[in-house]
Image (cartoon, rainbow, N blue to C red):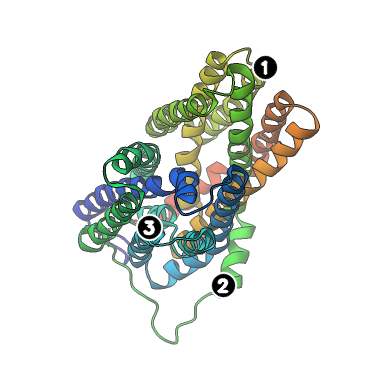
Amino acid sequence: MTLPPDSPSPRHWRRSSIVLTFAVFITFIGIGFLYPLLPLYLQEIGVTDLTGVRIWSGAIGSAQGLAFALSAPLWGILADRVGRKPMVVRAMVVSGLGIAAAALVHDPLLLMIVVIFRGLAAAPGTAAMALVSTTVPRQHLTRSISYMQAALVIGMSGGPVLGGLLVGLVGMRLAFAFGGAISLVAGILVLVFAVERFERPARGSRRPSVFQNAAALIAGPTLVLAVLQGILWMADQGSIPIRTLHVQDLGGTESAAATAGLIQGLFSATAVVGIVSTSWLVDRFGFRNVLVGAVVGFGVMFVPQGLAPNVIVLGGARMAQGVFFGLIGPAVQTLVGLSASPDRRATAYGTLATFSGGGGAIGPITLGAVAAAVSLPAAFMAAGLMVVPVVFLVLARLDISAIMWESTSVEDRGDAGPD
């Protein structure tokens, strides 16, 4: 089988996959240095009022998420036109510069501008996923994506721990500078060691417009997968602040922050278990069964959290939910890669990121309103009900057999590399 422009040799795609996974890991360690420490950093640069810290923290977090959601498809379109590897390098370098630049500001408004710039110009995880999807052979794609998502989650979970230790040694500004530096190193590693055989279309050749690309994605299964991901992120991200308040009600104010942080850390740990199990389960039970089972389990686990009589039950339910959540991500990411044509994959991943970011932004507002109008347990039940449409989307609107057949046909035509 001849190799197409996008597909390196077996030795090269394996090396690229390993390099990208490690680069994503250290990039998200660096990112983890910044965002969890923002409330403390705001106090260091002069926001002394606790209410002001909360307002600025929320505003900066929302602005970053909105910037990411708006820009991700545009970077995806550009990646499909000029190559995915340059976009990965750009994203990791810009991410590092944005984190390091935060160490130089002395005003909350400037800090927000830096964070917005980083959100608009970075998206390293999305760019890396697009590159993996076009270089790794179809039969190895789920496993490669699972490893990369595990690296992302571990990096984001370990970053705050390492960042907190480093702050105690060298201070917050130098810790940010170090976090930015390791992201720059990640970009250099990808530049030097990752391989992508991408050929730009010849000048004057007919290429689909941005609107034609968008129409093709909307008409296909990518939109269903993006909506599915957006709803799940709405439920998950929206439940995080509600859960902290629930911990406070169950265990008292003094230990609420530490307990809520521990529960979220355990959720991340069990999510990794689900992530690395996805490939094995998909091979044995298929994408549809794994997705439906994981989505149902994820939604059901909101019920014991809302009814939890103590933080142990709450934490145990959240840990179980982490396994299901970890199974969903690689399955969805793989299906996006298989359903989109090779020349539109980065655009497809950008679209997926937009829906994820949008869901993450809408969720806290929606569930917060339910909690304020009814009760905290009712907000958890509402989060569980949000997941119901996802089950119907998978069963009724997601033709996984057609996705698998089409991706196999593309590979047979020479659009994917051999093992």
List the residue tagged with mark 2: 210
User: Split into 4 quadrants, where in the image is the N terminus?
Assistant: bottom left
Could you give the CA–CA distance between mark 3 and mark 1, rounded to whole angstroms?
A: 43 Å
User: Percent position (x, y) of residue 115?
Assistant: 48, 59
Q: Nearer the viewer, mark 3 or mark 2?
A: 3
Mark 2, Cα crowd under 10 Å, few <14 / some 14-19 / many 20+, is: few
Disc 1 residue type (three-letter): Leu
- Count of labels shown? 3
Q: Nearer the viewer, mark 3 or mark 1?
A: 3
Could you give the CA–CA distance between mark 3 and mark 2, rounded to whole angstroms?
A: 37 Å
SS class, disc 3: loop
Residue at coordinates 65% horizontally, 42% vertically from top-left?
363
SS class, disc 1: loop
Indicate which disc, 2 or 1, sits on the residue closer to the N terminus.
Answer: 2
Residue at coordinates 25% horizontally, 57% vertically from top-left?
185
Asked if the residues shown at circle 2 and circle 1 are in contact, with their CB atoms under 8 angstroms apart, the answer is no
Indicate which disc, 3 or 2, sits on the residue closer to the N terminus.
Answer: 3
Residue 36 appears left or right of 394: left
User: Percent position (x, y) of residue 141?
Assistant: 37, 45
Q: Residue furthest right?
A: 373
List the residue tagged with mark 1: 307
